Amino acid sequence: MRLNLLSVAVFLLTTALAGKKTVPDPDVNGKYWINGEGISASFVPYGASISNLLINDQYGIQRDIVTGFDNASYYGIDRQHPHFGGVPGRYANRIKNSSFELDGVTYHVLANENPTATHPDGLDTLHGGPDGWDWRNFTVESYTNNSITFSIVDPDGKEGFPGEVVSYITYTLGKMTWDFKMVAIATTKKTPIMLSSHTYWNLDGFANNETQSTLNHTFYLPYSGQRVGVDNILIPTGDILANKLGSVNDFWSAPKQIGHSFSDPEIHGNCGFNCSGYDTCWLVSRDQEGPYDWRKDGFVARLQSAWSGIQLDVYSDQEAFQMYSCNGQNGSMALKTTQGLFDNPEFPRTIPKYGCVVLEVEDWIDGINRPEWQRGRKQIFEPGGDPYVLQASYRFSINSTAADF
């Protein structure tokens, strides 16, 4: 059933404002804290970003398992921040040649990745451009003890995208759960929309006294026997590739540690030119098992640390899943005061290469430039049509066993 645009907008605004008299002020660090059972998290308006996520590990010690900054003001000051915990938009991931076509019209958006002498701004657009959503301040629409809703109005022409888009991002904590819903409405013109959550994880809270790496984290994608083929700057080629049994990109046949295949020559170049690791978009193929309810019929991804015992199961309505193994981190980003070791000189209080892992629920990347993939209904939206909706549930538990195959 199609949703009436005006009804959706009224519902969203009513929901956001329900019970809202005055939005309370953030804490002294500019963060809005919400709480669930066994879990607490803070968020900042900059990028509608998660800034802290606190859970007790298997020893009862509280760990902050996402990257971020101690103070909300740092997000706007430190321009090197790698999309810490924010909502990339209005189109997440990469856009080939910083352009796309809609109804015979070619649109050029601002480039911001892979600069060259002839293209100093870049060859492609990453996460919505140089001033994408996760570089901007959202508005806090509602705020309760366990939930917060942010909004943003993205103007017509911003970063080169056609039409205005209005979006609401709601985060809710429950019993060891973090749920989020992202809704976006094209109000004036047909336009591409694809969002995600760009959260960096270290399930040990950088407190493991043996390694700061997440290569020892176990990762599992039970529905992802295929991935999007990319060139050496990670732009999709249009090919859908098989993750052959036992190969570097096989996380579907059984759980394995992220670093398990790093001795395999295939890992070199797996995340682009001269890059060893992962920055990979796996497809989530669940239809072969018949109708399913994404909320309860199995997780699409699992991340687990044997050291902390913390396990994250990701449930989502999206049909792709990107994992990035923090190949670009180089020790220049500081840890928060809630993380890491303070008495071990072997591990500086910074994020090392492979010291984190990004998990992104989303649709097929650069689908707007691959009409043969037939992703139009998932990625192109227009006034009077259905809104864009992304839903996910991140469910935490304690499980001290982890696989390494």
Image (cartoon, rainbow, N blue to C red):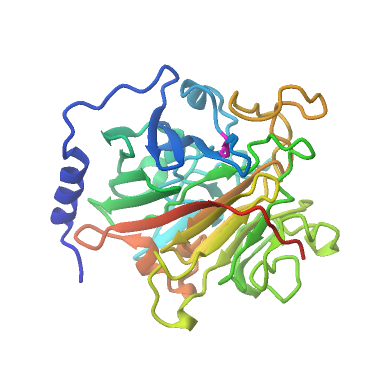
170 left or right, relative to 19 = right
Measured as percent of width and height from the top left, residue 8 is found at: 18, 54
Which stretch is magenta?
A: 63-67
15 left or right, relative to 337 = left
In the rendered image, the vertical position of residue 113 relative to residue 364, given as above or below: above
Residue at 51% in and 46% down: 198
In the rendered image, the vertical position of residue 139 relative to residue 253, given as above or below: above
Residue 94 visible to the viewer: no
Quadrant in which the C terminus appears: bottom right
Count up the numbered dots: 0
Is 64 magenta? The answer is yes
249 left or right, relative to 369 = right
257 left or right, relative to 172 = right
Measured as percent of width and height from the top left, residue 372 is found at: 48, 75
Is 196 magenta? The answer is no
The residue most toward the top is: 28
Measured as percent of width and height from the top left, residue 190 is found at: 29, 58
Name which quarter of the figure residue 66 lies in: top right
Residue 211 visible to the viewer: yes
Quadrant in which the N terminus appears: bottom left
Residue at 38% in and 65% down: 378
The residue most toward the front is: 59
The foreground one among 58 and 209 is 58
> What secondary structure prevails in the magenta region?
loop
